[in-house]
Image (cartoon, grey):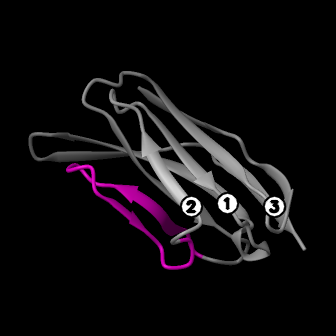
Amino acid sequence: QVQLVESGGGLVQAGGSLRLSCVASGSILGINVDAWYRQAPGKERELVALISNSGSLDYADSVKGRFTISRNNIGNTMYLEMNSLKPEDTAVYYCHAMRVSFATVNNYWGQGTQVIVSE
């Protein structure tokens, strides 16, 4: 059993900053927390930022230059530094983790943390 717990969300004014954290616990052998997603009301969940297996970083065009994803060396803790926040960044932010074992890929999700950016 793997648990992902996000924290750091909240209410912030436009132009402000937040730092989200995601910690994986439980049976984390072979786990890599690797991506942040978000889902705004009435919209589909979208990828915000990703750390690939090689360590390269990728971002949605809408957050490039404002958000920074990082992860600890163990691979069980991940962060999302969000700067210059805009009202359109308002969403529930979810942490994603993956474990690949032989031919099986298991995906794990946190419960989400709410980010609200006011005008």
Q: Secondary structure at mark 1?
A: loop
Circle on res. 67: 2
Q: How many marks?
A: 3
- Distance, label 3 to label 2, CA atoms, is 15 Å
Residue at horizontal 57%, vertical 52%?
94
Residue at horizontal 39%, vertical 58%?
50
Q: Secondary structure at mark 2?
A: strand
Q: Nearer the viewer, residue 29 or 107?
A: 29
In the current view of this chain or complex, which residue is farthest to the left? 102
Circle on res. 116: 3
**Dot placed on the residue nearer the N-terminal end, 1 or 2:** 2
Identify residue type, mark 3.
Answer: Ile
Q: Secondary structure at mark 3?
A: strand
Residue at horizontal 71%, vertical 66%?
84
**Dot placed on the residue nearer the N-terminal end, 3 or 1:** 1
Name the residue carrying label 1: 83
Q: Nearer the viewer, mark 3 or mark 2?
A: 2
- Residue segment shown in magenta: 44-63
